[in-house]
């Protein structure tokens, strides 16, 4: 059994700052789980911060740079070849591919409907919302609590 669960964080949970802050703090030492993402996810976070939330490009880029700096082992690579095999929502295939590539236990997203055509569970990855994930981390009897 793994010491801690591994979770890929979709861009949609990394943009609302209260949610992102909570998830990232729990991934800091002593970590309750291992957070993962890709450059593509970080690019989406940067775009969303600039376009939807009106942050300057410099501030939006700072967020991704800080995540790279403080979580140097979180970047998932070598997942691109899996994207074409994913059957979920096209724009989120890269997220499921990253979760499969890094053998994640969870894929944390607000867009659960984007993962129903080919359930993430087919790859032994549970696509769940952040509230459900946080409850699992802290629930008594959890192998990770």
Image (cartoon, grey):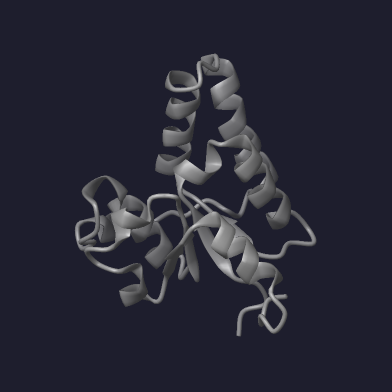
The answer to whether 105 is drawn above or below residue 17 in the figure is: below
Picture residue at 35% right of the left edge, 59% below the top? 96
Query: Which x, y percent locates residue 86?
Result: 24, 61
**Camera-side residue: 8 or 101?**
8
**Camera-side residue: 48 or 58?**
48
The answer to whether 23 is drawn above or below residue 20 in the figure is: below
Question: Which part of the image, by quadrant, shows the C terminus?
Answer: bottom right
Horizontally, is 19 left or right of 126 in the view? right
Q: Quadrant of residue 67?
A: top right
**Camera-side residue: 55 or 67?**
55
Query: Which x, y percent locates residue 15?
Result: 53, 36
The answer to whether 63 is drawn above or below residue 71 in the figure is: above
Query: Which x, y percent locates residue 64?
Result: 56, 34
Picture residue at 66% right of the left edge, 68% below the top? 137
Picture residue at 20% right of the left edge, 63% below the top? 85
Q: Quadrant of residue 4?
A: bottom right
Horizontally, is 17 left or right of 43 in the view? right
Picture residue at 67% right of the left edge, 42% below the top? 21
Single out the residue that lies furthest toward the right.
Answer: 30
Query: Which x, y percent locates residue 99?
Result: 42, 62
């Amino acid at each position: 059994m793994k010491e801690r669960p591994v979770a890929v964080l979709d861009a949609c949970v990394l943009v609302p700052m209260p949610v992102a802050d909570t998830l990232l703090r729990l991934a800091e030492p002593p970590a309750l789980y291992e957070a993962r993402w890709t450059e593509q996810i970080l690019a989406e976070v940067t775009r969303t911060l600039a376009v939807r939330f009106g942050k300057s490009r410099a501030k939006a880029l700072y967020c991704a740079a800080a995540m790279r700096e403080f979580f140097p082992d979180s970047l998932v690579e070598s997942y691109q070849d899996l994207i074409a095999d994913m059957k979920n929502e096209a724009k989120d295939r890269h997220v499921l591919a990253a979760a499969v590539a890094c053998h994640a236990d969870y894929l944390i997203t607000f867009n659960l409907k984007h993962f129903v055509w080919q359930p993430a569970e087919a790859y032994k990855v549970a696509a769940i919302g952040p509230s459900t994930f946080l409850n699992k981390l802290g629930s008594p009897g959890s192998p990770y609590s």
